[in-house]
């Protein structure tokens, strides 16, 4: 294992400190936690938006903290759900009377722990609600999941719920747009190679030199099929068609596209893939409103990518376009 | 070689098309070229800002096209200078009477070809000037370079010269802030593994499983030393100290910091490195004005990083903070 780290068992704390050190004007690290929270102007009353999950998916989620997106992010150990007490700390830190909304990726541990944290907070009189993101169309159940997994589409939920909260939306209104986003977003990924969890010291899985895996999860959970590596055009077709097969589009409807790198894929390759994805959507008369290409939801140094489509309406477009100061999603 | 590509000899054109397809509202691909240019409002009169170089360093340079930064970027073949005729096309595309300024990284081929393009343009009556960026403190001469190499610090030159041009600065004024930035910026990098040029099909160099190279270039050019992999803290110290040794700082002076990933390094590791870099600067009473962590100047899927410091004054701070709509450097 070759990594730029100190102690393999200390990577999350070192990372959280390093993030806080990068943005001292806008972020604070809550003492004795793995929680990063936005420095709010005193007296700000808005719904607090909290997300988090296992580490190793950076910039998810701490990179999405900022005006117009998240108020706090909780970092679990690598590929491990954060504990309820950590999530509870985040909730308390961002609550200022308007309630707190949690964006949870659909992994059994995350759902359980965020729900337990919500109960702890409600017991202290804090209004809490949540949404579970399950955008991955690849497989129904998986290693860590009952039901579909939450992957890169989660970032659109952060953006849209964040914009609604920033605009003064109530807890119910934030939940409503978050649920609409979850209903409208679909993703699918593929990998060429695995990442390495620092404490494990070796790659999570092995693919042969001529092999790829379609439908893989962001922790390396099994996908649909391992097969010979295909061209970028073929990969684009396979991912895009699977996503489109899962959601109804009327001709002329608009989407946001996210071409997400999983960690070690050169941006060159993401753009090559994007060229074909855009062509396929044009052929199907699906209009692209906005495209995002980059690393938004990674899996350590996994080589691979995912394609996400978010079906838009007027409300979602407006919220997607709203300003954001989050370092990993400035708009 | 495992890559998400179609034809290994066609990657640059496929990428350029994929970039244009991602940002159709703000970018255009000049027909029959490898040039991407900003769609300007008709009648805009400002100094045109052009950069470019070999491909494989994405988001450099096309990701920096946008209001407040570059007006055009020229993509050479992977790790290969763009030809003079391509640079000339870019110059013509962005000239509107105020002159064109070129930001060139210090590689022998780039310098020659951008200078030849400038001569072609001047012969047609276009005012052209340029700056050569040589921020890499690692080695004096190198495989492709006479003098120091231009690496991640180039992105700060794009930002600052771009802001000056956007604000209506003259060609002389844009050159003056670009030169000040070059005089004030220093970088140094290290790698854990090599990237693979698609047309070559195999990694550019080999490092043993317990080895790293300090001072390596963004094309894998030899650095200062190969040695056993060190901790993130030790790497941070080595890179930061070499950068600091090369430029005078008075106590209390301010810098911008860029912690740049070379392609395959998880963002987690960049933030871990950042934690120590910030600590070292604080110990030396160097005040950090702003920090940028991410992939700004890559080397395909090389694992590794670089540390860049830019010494700031009031003018540079203002230009660094100016708005930018470039996809890879939104502010």
Image (tube, coloured by chain):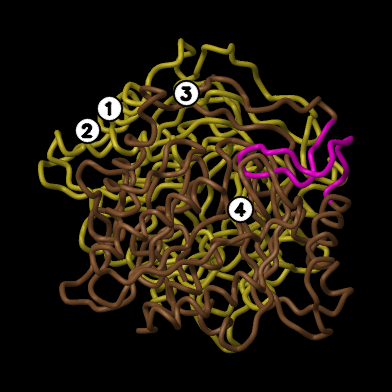
Chain colours: A brown, B yellow
Magenta stretch: give its range: A211-232
Q: Position of residue B112 (x, y in %)?
A: 62, 44
Q: Position of residue A2 (x, y in %)?
A: 52, 21
Q: Give me the C-alpha separation between circle 3 and circle 2.
A: 27 Å
Secondary element at tag 4 = strand
Mark in front: 4 vs 2? 2
Q: Is residue A18 visible?
A: yes
Residue located beneath label 4 in the image: B52
Q: Position of residue A88 (x, y in %)?
A: 31, 54
Question: Pointer 2 and pointer 1: residues touching (CB < 8 Å)?
Answer: yes
B84 displayed left or right of A232: left
Residue located beneath label 1 in the image: B241
Q: Give me the C-alpha separation between circle 3 and circle 4.
A: 40 Å
Residue located beneath label 2 in the image: B280
Total marks placed: 4
B243 displayed left or right of A42: right
Q: Give me the C-alpha separation between circle 4 and circle 1.
A: 30 Å
Residue located beneath label 3 in the image: A199
Tell which subunit mark 1 falls on: B
Quadrant housing residue A279: bottom right
Front residue of B273/B118: it is B273
């Amino acid at each position: 294992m070759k990594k730029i780290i100190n102690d393999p068992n200390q990577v999350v704390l070192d990372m959280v400190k390093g993030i806080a050190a990068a943005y001292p004007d806008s972020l604070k690290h809550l003492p004795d936690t793995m929680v990063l929270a936005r420095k709010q102007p005193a007296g700000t009353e808005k719904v607090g938006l909290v997300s988090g999950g296992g580490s190793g998916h950076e910039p998810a989620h701490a990179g999405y903290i900022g005006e117009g997106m998240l108020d706090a992010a909780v970092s679990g150990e690598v590929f491990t759900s954060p504990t309820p007490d950590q999530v509870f700390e985040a909730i308390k830190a961002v609550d200022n009377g308007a309630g707190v909304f949690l964006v949870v990726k659909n992994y059994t541990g995350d759902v359980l722990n965020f729900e337990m944290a919500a109960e702890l907070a409600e017991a202290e009189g804090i209004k809490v609600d949540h949404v579970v993101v399950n955008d991955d169309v690849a497989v129904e159940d998986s290693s860590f999941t009952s039901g579909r997994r939450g992957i890169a589409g989660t970032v659109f939920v952060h953006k849209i719920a964040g914009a609604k909260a920033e605009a003064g939306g109530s807890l119910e209104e934030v939940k409503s747009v978050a649920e609409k986003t979850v209903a409208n977003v679909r993703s699918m990924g593929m990998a060429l190679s695995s990442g390495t969890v620092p404490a494990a010291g070796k790659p999570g899985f092995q693919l042969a030199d001529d092999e790829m895996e379609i439908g893989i999860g962001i922790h390396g959970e099994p996908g649909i099929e391992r097969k010979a590596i295909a061209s970028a055009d073929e990969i684009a077709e396979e991912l895009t068609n699977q996503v489109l097969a899962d959601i109804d589009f009327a001709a002329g409807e608009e989407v946001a596209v996210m071409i997400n790198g999983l960690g070690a894929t050169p941006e060159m390759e993401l753009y090559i893939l994007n060229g074909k994805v855009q062509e396929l959507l044009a052929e199907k008369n699906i209009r692209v409103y906005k495209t995002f290409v980059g690393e938004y939801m990674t899996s350590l140094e996994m080589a691979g990518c995912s394609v996400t489509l978010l079906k838009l309406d007027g409300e979602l477009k407006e919220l997607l376009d709203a300003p954001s100061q989050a370092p990993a999603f400035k708009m």
